Amino acid sequence: MPRMTGTQALVQLLRAEGATTIFGNPGTTESPLIDALQDAPDIKYMVTLQEASALGMADGYARATGKPAFVQVHISVGIANADSMLYNAFKGGTPLVVTAGQVDTHLLMQDAILSSNQAERTRYSKWSAEVLHTRELPMAVRRAFKMAKTPPTGPTFLSLPWNVMDEADELNDVVPSSPGYYRVRPDVQAVEKAAALLAKAERPVMLIGDRIAQAGGMKEAVALAETLGASVYAGSYTEVNFPTGHPQYLGGVNVGWPNQATRNALKDADVVLVVGADVLPAYAYTPEPFFNPKAKIIQLDISQWDIEKKYPVEIGILADPKAGMAELNAALQATMNGEEQEAARSRAVTAGEGKARRKAAFQERVKATWNNPVISPERMMTELAQVMPRNAIMASEAITSGGALMGAMDFNEPGSFYSARGGALGWGIPGSLGVQLANPGRPVVAVVGDGASMYTIQGLWTAARYNIPVVYVICNNGSWRILREGMARYLTDTNRNPDNELLNFSGLPLNLAKVAEGMNVEGIHVEKPQDLKRAYERAFAAGKPVLVDVAIDDTMPTKALQDDYRPFNPYQVTR
């Protein structure tokens, strides 16, 4: 058996897994691997200035490649720094193998500096462990990669003590994890029952989620929706689960704060087909139902946890979304009679008419705000769509300007759109770098809110260090607008002022163009609408990382927000 150190084994295992890019923020306890990489020029270490940037960058890379990315963070406190992005990866199902150094195991009982129970601290992972013996390292690394890439995918964590990495042992199992064959086919009886129910549906709705994109099932989703003639709504849309330009795609439903648009989309459905989605994840409670109480729900997912997690389900189908939708569509086509097929075609036409009305309404908003003295989000995104290269990939953390972005642009090809998921701010700056590294031949545009950008602004330094040519476009409204909108809803039907000074930047807006310059990234600040197009053109022509800081209108539609939320408000704020 070959004799090697834990570090030597890890380097060989990374090569075997094809994980030759490491995303990290090293510390002293990570010295063994950092030193070993001097003798491994084929493995590239992407240095970040803070662990959240490392996790976010790896998240974008893993999602864009479809393979687990390898991350190294510092002991204990580094895990704390990374935790927000680890949470996002866990909630979104990003395949990551995250590691942190640990003190020598002989010091653990002494409560050594920076030591902690790291496996216990990383609960937002599919599996976590501390490797206590060098001989266990190959098995642990294989398991970490296998668990990360097995659907439902997600992050795993390994704590690697210093002596485990430095000590040598006889190791004969330094081999990669198996490729894995994860196209789990659905139960035949479940498919037949679902097809029969869908064929008879009069007002079916299809609710889609990100596990469609993760399974590579966009085409199958389109084919199934067209057979059914269903209106299609996104329960989550952080990747291209369905082409947004398709006439049956009617946008996202969001009950983070309950709203009338979501109720209108779902209240009349007699059958709801949910594929690869967490069903209506809520942020604020309301007792008001969104589904018709008589509606029958069919749920198809590879995540057994999500099937019937919240709502009663008529038929639950555990299957890979791509394989499951293909078989369900075939069964549905074989089941529907001529009258049912004609009804489906009629429903599709009706959905297309609704789509056209939505597009027209957005164009009216663009027209109404185009000549405003302060740049509107609608103009900002429309001009970006006009200048952006046709093959560009969008990485969005636009938050409250996201509606304008999705109104101005369509994303019809897999891999053309990525967005933050999980809820923790800070993905946009580093996540876009990972997407760009995975797609070196295509331009990447990152649209990020000013508040969100500051959670991982250090990522700009990494962009400069490696000349990763992401074009950053900042939606600078001088506040945490998402919080201001939330406060407005919360204070519905009170005499309280929702414009709380703690939720804005108190007249001290961030000049992110200057911040970018301080990190060796070119910054362009735009305040005048007539300067916007020229700034975009300059950024895309640069061939290097550039940040365009766009000052946009921060006007709050308080009355409209409160009118929309009022029917759902369970809170009686009387003060």
Image (tube, rainbow, N blue to C red):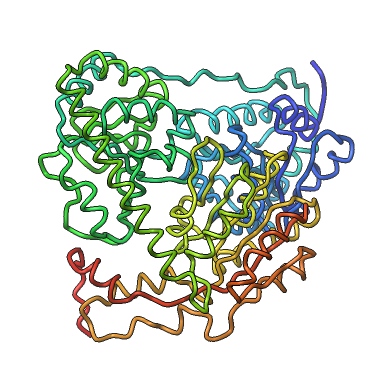
Q: Is residue 179 above or below residue 446?
A: above
Looking at the image, residue 245 lies above or below residue 424: above
Residue found farthest to the right: 39
Relative vertical location of residue 542 with respect to residue 492 in this rendering, above or below: above
Q: What residue is at 21 percent from the left and 22 percent from the top?
A: 341
Q: Residue at x 35, y 30 (%)?
A: 301
Q: Is residue 440 left or right of residue 121?
A: right
Q: Position of residue 96 (x, y in %)?
A: 59, 39
Work out whether residue 128 can be spotted.
no
Front residue (pair 120, 33):
33
Does 170 sit left or right of 336 as displayed? right
Residue lying farthest left?
A: 294
Q: Quadrant where the N terminus lies?
A: top right
- Most foreground residue, 276 or 77: 276
Instruction: Identify the image quadrant of the C terminus.
Output: bottom left
Residue 364: percent from the left, percent from the top?
38, 63
Say which of 204 and 536 sits in front: 536
* Residue 455: quarter of image: bottom right
Task: Give the total number of marks visible in the rendering.
Answer: 0
Quadrant of the rendered image containing residue 558:
bottom left
Which residue is pictured at 22% across the width and 27% down the height? 315
**Looking at the image, which is closer to me, 565 or 286?**
565
Give the percent coordinates (x, y) of residue 564: 24, 66
On the image, the x and y values in percent for residue 360 come to 36, 55
Q: Is residue 413 visible?
A: yes
- Is residue 455 toward the left or the right of residue 197 in the image? right
